[in-house]
Amino acid sequence: MINRKNGRLPIVRVLVVFSVLVLLLNGAIVAHRAFDSYKKSLEAGTAESERLLRILADHVELTFLAVDVTLRRASERQYFNALFGHNLQDDIQNNFTVWVNETPQIAAMLMTDEHGAIKMIYRKQGYKTWMEGKESLENEGYFTTQRDSDDPDLLYLAPRQSWIQDKDLIVMSRRISKLDGSFGGIVLAAIHNSYLIDFFQSLETGKRTKFAVIRDDNRSLINQLDEADAEVLQSMINVQQPKADLESEEAPKHVYSTKVVGAEGPSLTEGAVRVYTYGYIPNLRLVIGLVSYGEDIFTGWHTDRMHDIAFLGMFGLFAIVISFFAITMANQMQRVQDSEQKAVMASQAKTEFLANMSHELRTPLNAIIGFSEMLDAGYFGKVNPKQQERIMDIHNCGSHLLELINDILEFSKGEAGMMDLRPEKVFLSKIVQTTLRMFSERAAAEGIQIIESVPEDLPPVFVDERKIKQVLINLISNAVKFTPKQGKVSIRASIDDEKNIRIAVEDTGIGMDEEDIPRAMSVFGQVHKDPKYGGTGLGLPLCKMLMDLHGGKMEITSKKNVGTTVAITIPATRIFWQNPKTLARDTTTPPANAA
């Protein structure tokens, strides 16, 4: 009868508690990363909004100033025409044609007299209906403002008026002065706001990022914002906009301000996070507003969090599977300890368990590796570089886990005494040459020279060929793996004084200190734990186990930064000392001197 108080139940409880603690620890790490990444994403999004705003504000200012330069030229040209008595009609018409066609911002220009009557107009193709049927502007704000103002340098901006059909335009006007300085009319330019909108869309903005261009009297020239966002931006402007004296030399050129709303904490939903940014351009008395939304700011953050959730789910599933197998093994081991009679049954159960685990783990792992290779090759469709990188991670992890499982299963069989030898008469020189061919391309790619010195006249031996080849594969693989480029790997065979055959694998690799050799020979012991070397820590212990099965031995000598030599010895009792050329064809009978 099993003592549940001191046996199986405490072990199960410890495993479950340990798994839960590990899962909680990983959850805490993921949560910490999420909060830290959230703050960084918000900071980056805010900085990006401010950057976009500055670019947009500079473009708006340059756009309007370029148009203003043309208006000044037109006003001055009219003044000089009046001064020198040139023909108004021909001169101004030619100038308007050149100015409108050479200035991409301007869609049309016109000029009025002091009573508002339109005297000259020129339109680009596509704007022929602009001012169609209009004869006077005497009641329009951009005319009356210039007429009633004493400021000869006044620049007036206004949005589209009702009489401008089919187009969203921004108009700019400047005063024309007569020779005596009195009001002589206005010159006006129409700017299609798509010139600014197209520029904004050409920037690398988010899908929902919007902007507005507003006069300092709260009248919008361009407004893509919804009502709620416009109110928030307006409240910022009312509180923070400086009342700078534009004539003062100390007045700032631009003033910027930023406000973040709804960013109290991270969420997997888009939420109500918005970044409001505006810039004030004093010389034009314009406010440029920009609103960025959380779904644009946290796109990468949301993707990373979904990956974290997937990772936790996979980790939890892995923990359950490992706990299940661990609990099963604990139950098996507990039954073994109950009595001598149950030891045989437990050994049989362990054998069945290892066979089942081999099938249950290898089959899905091979499927995972195969599917990852198909995905990487584009069998199911093209994948982007980010996806291809994750697919390669899956393939590498699956291959590593399969290698670990194979080593564990092989080692477990040896420890359980279930590993049998199938000896036959073989020639070591052929085994060595076959093994070296497996590594020739890899070594050549790394610039590693392989030197083979195995006499062909070595007597044949009575060993398990597959297991001896497995030993050589592990030893040569380690030598190549730990040897830097342009290094050397040597495989030498000889007969020692006791008539044993000694095969030594020597490399000029990174080596190790003498005190580290026992750790390298221990189960799962790894001296060099750099991920680039890989490995499971079972290779050398497994080689030693296989050599012990043959009655041989394995020895290691090494020096750090000089190299390592691993020598295996096949005992004389397994050697056929007759001349190889006269040997019988029978390969299953041991040598006469076999113990």
Image (cartoon, rainbow, N blue to C red):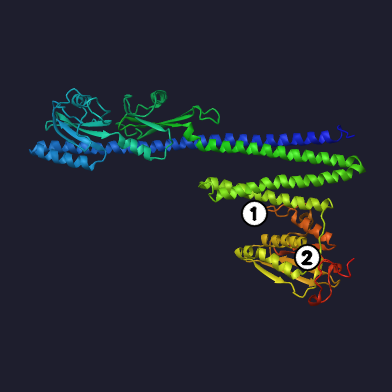
User: Residue at horizontal 31%, vertical 25%?
Assistant: 219
How far from the left and from the top, in percent, is residue 153?
A: 22, 32
Residue occupying image coordinates x 57% and y 46%: 390
Q: Residues within 10 Å of mark 1 (few under 14, many from 20)?
A: few
Q: Position of residue 234 (x, y in %)?
A: 39, 24
The quarter of the displayed image where residue 291 is located? top left
Res 188 → quadrant? top left
Q: Quadrant of residue 313?
A: top right
Mark 1 lies on residue: 532
Left/right of residue 248 with respect to residue 583 in the rendered view: left
Q: Which residue is mark 2?
A: 567
The answer to which of 576 and 157 lies nearer the viewer is 576
Task: Establish if 374 lies above or below 137.
Answer: below
Alpha carbons under labels 1 and 2: distance apart: 25 Å
Residue 584 can be seen, yes or no: yes
Is residue 194 or residue 467 the one in the foreground?
Answer: 467
Tell me if 484 is positioned left or right of 526 in this view: left
